[in-house]
Amino acid sequence: MSASLATRRVVASLVAAGALIGAAALPAVAADHGRDHKGQRSAVVIGGVQYDSPNRDDRSNRALNGEWVEVKNTGRHSVNLRGFTLTDREGNRYRFSDFRLDGRSSVKVHTGQGRNTQRDLYQGRRQQIWDKRDTATLRDNRGNVLDTQSWGRGGHHHHG
Protein backbone atom coordinates (compact mmCIF):
# COMPACT_ATOMS: atom_id res chain seq x y z
CA MET A 1 0.00 0.00 0.00
CA SER A 2 2.65 2.52 1.09
CA ALA A 3 4.78 1.69 -1.93
CA SER A 4 2.03 2.64 -4.33
CA LEU A 5 1.36 5.83 -2.38
CA ALA A 6 5.05 6.76 -2.63
CA THR A 7 5.00 6.02 -6.34
CA ARG A 8 1.92 8.13 -6.78
CA ARG A 9 3.61 10.98 -4.91
CA VAL A 10 6.63 10.81 -7.21
CA VAL A 11 4.35 10.77 -10.26
CA ALA A 12 2.46 13.77 -8.87
CA SER A 13 5.66 15.74 -8.40
CA LEU A 14 6.82 14.81 -11.90
CA VAL A 15 3.49 15.98 -13.28
CA ALA A 16 3.77 19.21 -11.31
CA ALA A 17 7.30 19.79 -12.61
CA GLY A 18 6.16 19.11 -16.16
CA ALA A 19 3.28 21.54 -15.76
CA LEU A 20 5.63 24.29 -14.58
CA ILE A 21 7.98 23.74 -17.49
CA GLY A 22 4.99 23.94 -19.81
CA ALA A 23 4.02 27.20 -18.09
CA ALA A 24 0.48 25.87 -18.01
CA ALA A 25 0.33 25.00 -14.33
CA LEU A 26 -3.04 23.51 -13.57
CA PRO A 27 -4.46 23.64 -10.07
CA ALA A 28 -3.69 20.38 -8.27
CA VAL A 29 -7.40 19.68 -7.97
CA ALA A 30 -7.82 19.50 -11.74
CA ALA A 31 -4.85 17.15 -12.05
CA ASP A 32 -6.23 14.79 -9.41
CA HIS A 33 -9.67 14.92 -10.94
CA GLY A 34 -8.26 13.87 -14.28
CA ARG A 35 -6.58 10.89 -12.69
CA ASP A 36 -9.89 9.54 -11.36
CA HIS A 37 -11.39 9.39 -14.83
CA LYS A 38 -8.38 7.68 -16.39
CA GLY A 39 -9.75 4.40 -15.03
CA GLN A 40 -12.89 4.68 -17.11
CA ARG A 41 -12.02 3.31 -20.50
CA SER A 42 -13.81 4.69 -23.48
CA ALA A 43 -16.58 2.48 -24.83
CA VAL A 44 -15.45 3.38 -28.35
CA VAL A 45 -12.28 1.51 -29.33
CA ILE A 46 -10.44 0.24 -32.38
CA GLY A 47 -11.55 -3.27 -33.28
CA GLY A 48 -9.97 -5.17 -36.13
CA VAL A 49 -7.52 -3.74 -38.66
CA GLN A 50 -7.08 -4.98 -42.22
CA TYR A 51 -4.02 -3.02 -43.30
CA ASP A 52 -2.63 -5.13 -46.08
CA SER A 53 -5.23 -5.30 -48.79
CA PRO A 54 -5.05 -8.48 -50.90
CA ASN A 55 -4.58 -6.48 -54.13
CA ARG A 56 -2.21 -3.98 -52.63
CA ASP A 57 -0.31 -3.24 -55.81
CA ASP A 58 -3.26 -2.36 -57.96
CA ARG A 59 -4.53 1.08 -57.06
CA SER A 60 -8.13 0.16 -57.75
CA ASN A 61 -10.87 1.36 -55.46
CA ARG A 62 -11.54 -2.27 -54.57
CA ALA A 63 -7.97 -2.65 -53.32
CA LEU A 64 -8.27 0.57 -51.31
CA ASN A 65 -11.48 -0.64 -49.72
CA GLY A 66 -9.86 -3.96 -48.86
CA GLU A 67 -7.95 -1.89 -46.32
CA TRP A 68 -9.94 -0.78 -43.27
CA VAL A 69 -9.91 0.00 -39.58
CA GLU A 70 -12.88 -1.08 -37.51
CA VAL A 71 -14.24 1.25 -34.85
CA LYS A 72 -16.21 -0.59 -32.20
CA ASN A 73 -18.68 0.61 -29.59
CA THR A 74 -18.37 -1.82 -26.67
CA GLY A 75 -20.89 0.07 -24.55
CA ARG A 76 -24.66 -0.31 -24.40
CA HIS A 77 -25.43 3.24 -25.47
CA SER A 78 -25.06 4.66 -28.94
CA VAL A 79 -22.35 7.28 -29.44
CA ASN A 80 -22.25 10.07 -31.99
CA LEU A 81 -18.79 9.98 -33.57
CA ARG A 82 -19.07 13.48 -35.05
CA GLY A 83 -15.64 15.10 -34.80
CA PHE A 84 -13.86 11.88 -33.82
CA THR A 85 -10.67 11.27 -35.81
CA LEU A 86 -8.68 8.30 -36.98
CA THR A 87 -5.02 8.96 -37.80
CA ASP A 88 -2.02 6.93 -38.96
CA ARG A 89 1.65 7.42 -38.04
CA GLU A 90 2.20 9.88 -40.88
CA GLY A 91 -0.64 12.03 -39.64
CA ASN A 92 -3.17 11.23 -42.38
CA ARG A 93 -6.45 11.99 -40.70
CA TYR A 94 -10.01 10.86 -41.23
CA ARG A 95 -12.66 12.91 -39.46
CA PHE A 96 -16.07 11.43 -38.77
CA SER A 97 -19.04 13.53 -39.72
CA ASP A 98 -22.41 13.07 -38.05
CA PHE A 99 -22.46 9.32 -37.46
CA ARG A 100 -24.27 7.46 -34.69
CA LEU A 101 -22.66 4.17 -33.75
CA ASP A 102 -25.16 1.96 -31.94
CA GLY A 103 -24.23 0.20 -28.72
CA ARG A 104 -22.45 -3.13 -29.14
CA SER A 105 -21.84 -2.58 -32.83
CA SER A 106 -18.97 -1.57 -35.09
CA VAL A 107 -18.26 0.26 -38.32
CA LYS A 108 -15.43 -0.31 -40.79
CA VAL A 109 -13.65 2.78 -42.07
CA HIS A 110 -12.41 1.91 -45.57
CA THR A 111 -9.63 3.86 -47.25
CA GLY A 112 -11.19 4.22 -50.70
CA GLN A 113 -14.44 5.62 -51.99
CA GLY A 114 -17.95 4.30 -51.54
CA ARG A 115 -21.37 5.03 -50.14
CA ASN A 116 -21.43 5.40 -46.36
CA THR A 117 -23.75 3.05 -44.49
CA GLN A 118 -24.31 2.08 -40.85
CA ARG A 119 -21.63 -0.62 -41.20
CA ASP A 120 -19.16 0.93 -43.63
CA LEU A 121 -17.66 4.40 -43.95
CA TYR A 122 -15.27 5.53 -46.69
CA GLN A 123 -12.37 7.98 -46.45
CA GLY A 124 -12.44 8.68 -50.20
CA ARG A 125 -8.67 8.45 -50.63
CA ARG A 126 -6.81 7.50 -53.78
CA GLN A 127 -3.91 5.66 -52.15
CA GLN A 128 -3.43 3.35 -49.24
CA ILE A 129 -2.47 4.88 -45.93
CA TRP A 130 -2.11 1.88 -43.59
CA ASP A 131 1.41 0.53 -43.97
CA LYS A 132 2.77 -2.87 -42.99
CA ARG A 133 4.10 -1.16 -39.87
CA ASP A 134 1.74 1.48 -38.63
CA THR A 135 -0.35 2.75 -35.76
CA ALA A 136 -4.00 3.71 -35.88
CA THR A 137 -5.07 6.27 -33.29
CA LEU A 138 -8.69 7.03 -32.44
CA ARG A 139 -9.46 10.36 -30.79
CA ASP A 140 -12.72 11.85 -29.60
CA ASN A 141 -14.05 15.24 -30.64
CA ARG A 142 -11.94 16.93 -27.95
CA GLY A 143 -8.74 15.30 -29.19
CA ASN A 144 -8.42 12.84 -26.32
CA VAL A 145 -6.83 9.55 -27.39
CA LEU A 146 -9.40 6.79 -26.90
CA ASP A 147 -7.44 3.89 -28.31
CA THR A 148 -4.42 3.01 -30.43
CA GLN A 149 -3.58 -0.13 -32.33
CA SER A 150 -0.08 -0.85 -33.65
CA TRP A 151 1.03 -3.63 -35.91
CA GLY A 152 4.05 -4.78 -37.89
CA ARG A 153 6.52 -4.83 -35.01
CA GLY A 154 6.69 -8.46 -33.97
CA GLY A 155 3.01 -8.85 -33.17
CA HIS A 156 -0.06 -8.77 -35.40
CA HIS A 157 1.22 -10.95 -38.19
CA HIS A 158 -1.45 -11.87 -40.71
CA HIS A 159 -0.61 -15.05 -42.58
CA GLY A 160 -2.24 -16.10 -45.79
Image (cartoon, rainbow, N blue to C red):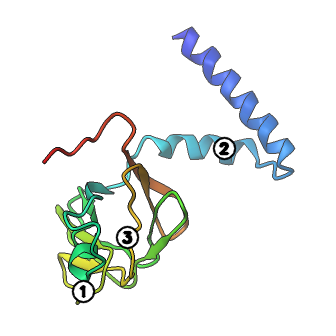
Q: Amino acid at mark 2?
A: Ala
Name the mark on residue 116: 1
Name the mark on residue 91: none
Q: Which residue is mark 3?
A: 128
Q: Residue at x 38, y 61 (%)?
A: 130
Relative to 11, say whether 71 is above or below: below
Q: Which x, y percent locates residue 156?
A: 28, 41
Which of discs 2 and 3 lies nearer the camera? The answer is: 3
Q: Which residue is mark 2?
A: 31
Q: Which x, y percent locates residue 12?
A: 69, 30
10 to the left or right of 112: right
Q: CA distance from mark 3 to mark 1?
A: 18 Å
- Residue 55 quadrant: bottom left
SS at mark 3 in the image: loop
SS at mark 1 in the image: loop
Q: Which x, y percent locates residue 11?
A: 67, 27
Q: Amino acid at mark 3?
A: Gln
SS at mark 2 in the image: helix
Q: CA distance from mark 2 to mark 1?
A: 40 Å
Viewer-proximal residue among 128 and 97? 128
70 to the left or right of 37: left
Residue 29 seen in this snapshot: yes
Q: Amino acid at mark 1?
A: Asn
- Packing grade of label 2 (10 A; few <14, some 14-19, many >=20) is some
Q: Residue at x 44, y 74 (%)?
A: 94
Residue 101 seen in this snapshot: no
